[in-house]
Amino acid sequence: MIKTFLAVAILISAFLAMPTRAQDAAAPFDGDLQRLAEILGALHHLRGICGSNEGAKWRNEMQALIDAETPSGARRTRMVAGFNRGYNVFAQTYRSCTPAANLAIRLYIEEGVKISRDLTDRYSN
């Protein structure tokens, strides 16, 4: 499921990179991208404390999303803030892996897959 989430997230970022629109203007899918950024931030923290040995995998996925979308100005700031918000909320709540942390991981991966698929379905050619 994680591989599917990552593959879909990378696919959407490729489809969403539209050079004809103003880079600083809000896109209709920005809310979904911000939520996806929050999920990636949460997963970066939660998977780290739950012993996944993934290192910077989720941070790298966020960087890949930013690289593919190439937002500038306020859009980039909002995406990075979403990642940091997702990370910080869980860093304040979970300092060790618990059953609730594992449940949050599972739910966030499922939500991330859903967002990725919805964005791909809605905005890809």
Image (cartoon, rainbow, N blue to C red):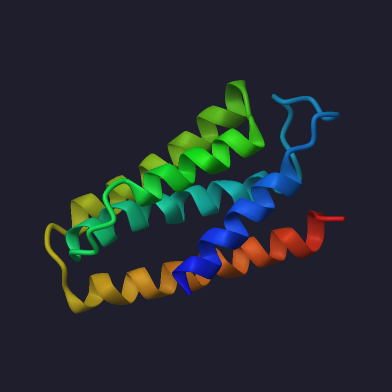
Instruction: Determine the image quadrant of residue 60.
Output: top left
Across and down, in percent, residue 1 comes to 48, 75
Residue at x 13%, y 57% (from the top left corner)? 95
User: In the rendered view, does 102 fall on the left or right side of 2?
Assistant: left
Across and down, in percent, residue 72 comes to 62, 23
Q: 45 or 57: which is nearer to us?
A: 57
Across and down, in percent, residue 52 comes to 24, 64
Residue 80 vertical position relative to residue 54 in the rendered view, above or below = above
Where does the C terminus fall, quadrant-wise?
bottom right
User: In the rendered view, does 21 fall on the left or right side of 92?
Assistant: right
User: In the rendered view, does 120 fall on the left or right side of 90?
Assistant: right
Residue 83 vertical position relative to residue 50 in the rendered view, above or below = above
Residue at x 56%, y 68% (from the top left corner)? 113
Task: Name the residue at the left extreme.
Answer: 96
Residue at x 48%, y 38% (from the top left corner)? 63
Across and down, in percent, residue 108 comes to 43, 67
Q: 123 or 91: which is nearer to us?
A: 123
Q: How many marks?
A: 0
Residue at x 86%, y 29% (from the top left corner)? 20
Instruction: Determine the image quadrant of residue 66.
Output: top right
Residue 68 vertical position relative to residue 37 in the rendered view, above or below = above
